[in-house]
């Protein structure tokens, strides 16, 4: 399949989400749950708890951050010790409920991202998703700089934060240009920015029907066993 038909642009990704929540019959909560579970499974596949138990989840204020909160819940149940940095928490019911779920599981929240990065074994980047538009504002300017410089492995949710969903990483010298996560978890289908990614690449889109995939022009890989994710080949053209 040609690459022009494999990757979902920002506009197409938003339209597909809208279709999944209309004719597809999914709620936002369901899609977020499936996305977060996929991300947690990718963390487990990449760095199981016996090797890297401490996970810092950096959550943004939108749906990408919500995916991170769901992932934090699953990671706790998978045997990890997650810590969440959530500096821009919106006062919306869906995020308040996710916050409550984590609080009930005694998941820790932190206000000190600098200290949290030094103490963690790995980082889940759930800051910005496919709807991200620059400029990056505080406190995430500092966070992106930390992600650029950290030696801890980073797993990004759908899009490496600071990257443009269609054109990839920022230009040399711009904030985020030096950020290359170790793992990328594309959700539903890969986005064009994935062409610039160098690392382990997982896809979490097992819930997509064959009919919807055909309509939007992308293929469905074979997901192993009961996994919600599948690792993609380094050359995405072979999907």
Image (cartoon, rainbow, N blue to C red):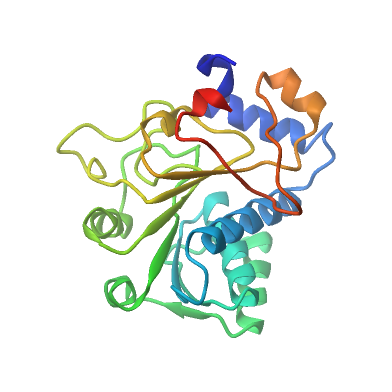
Q: Is residue 142 left or right of residue 21?
A: left
Q: Residue furthest left?
A: 173
Q: Is residue 28 left or right of residue 53?
A: right
- Counting labels gives 0
Q: Is residue 9 left or right of residue 142?
A: right
**187 relative to 113, above or below:** above
Residue 91 shows up from this direction: no
**55 relative to 143, above or below:** below
- Residue at 14 percent across and 38 percent down: it is 173
- Residue at 63 percent across and 53 percent down: it is 38
Residue 130 shows up from this direction: yes
Residue 43 coordinates in the image, percent (x, y): 52, 61
Q: Nearer the viewer, residue 162 or 182?
A: 182
- Residue at 64 percent across and 51 percent down: it is 35
Q: Nearer the viewer, residue 225 or 155?
A: 225
Residue 204: which quarter of the image? top right
Residue 78 coordinates in the image, percent (x, y): 63, 73
Residue 169 coordinates in the image, percent (x, y): 31, 35
Q: Is residue 7 left or right of residue 27?
A: left
Residue 105: which quarter of the image? bottom right
Q: Nearer the viewer, residue 44 or 186?
A: 44
**Which quadrant is home to the C terminus?**
top right
Residue 103 coordinates in the image, percent (x, y): 61, 81
- Residue at 69 percent across and 50 percent down: it is 228
**59 relative to 183, above or below:** below
**Which quadrant is home to the N terminus?**
top right
């Amino acid at each position: 399949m040609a690459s022009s038909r494999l990757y979902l642009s920002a506009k197409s990704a938003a339209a597909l989400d809208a279709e999944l929540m209309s004719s597809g019959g999914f709620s936002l909560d369901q899609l977020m749950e499936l996305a977060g579970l996929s991300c947690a499974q990718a963390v487990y596949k990449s760095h199981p708890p016996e090797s890297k138990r401490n996970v810092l989840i950096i959550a943004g204020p939108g749906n990408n951050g919500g995916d991170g909160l769901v992932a934090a819940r699953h990671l706790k149940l998978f045997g990890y010790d997650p810590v969440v940095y959530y500096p821009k928490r919106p006062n919306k019911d869906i995020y308040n409920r996710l916050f409550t779920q984590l609080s009930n599981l005694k998941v820790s929240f932190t206000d000190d991202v600098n200290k949290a990065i030094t103490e963690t074994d790995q980082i889940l980047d759930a800051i910005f998703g496919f709807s991200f538009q620059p400029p990056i504002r505080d406190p995430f300017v500092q966070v992106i700089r930390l992600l650029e410089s950290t030696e801890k492995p980073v797993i990004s949710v759908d899009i490496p934060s600071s990257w443009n969903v269609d054109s990839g990483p920022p230009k040399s010298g711009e904030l985020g240009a030096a950020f290359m996560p170790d793992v990328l978890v594309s959700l539903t289908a890969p986005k064009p920015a994935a062409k610039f990614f160098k690392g382990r690449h997982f896809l979490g889109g097992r819930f997509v029907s064959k009919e919807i995939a055909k309509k939007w022009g992308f293929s469905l890989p074979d997901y192993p066993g009961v996994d919600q994710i599948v690792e993609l080949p380094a050359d995405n053209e072979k999907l």
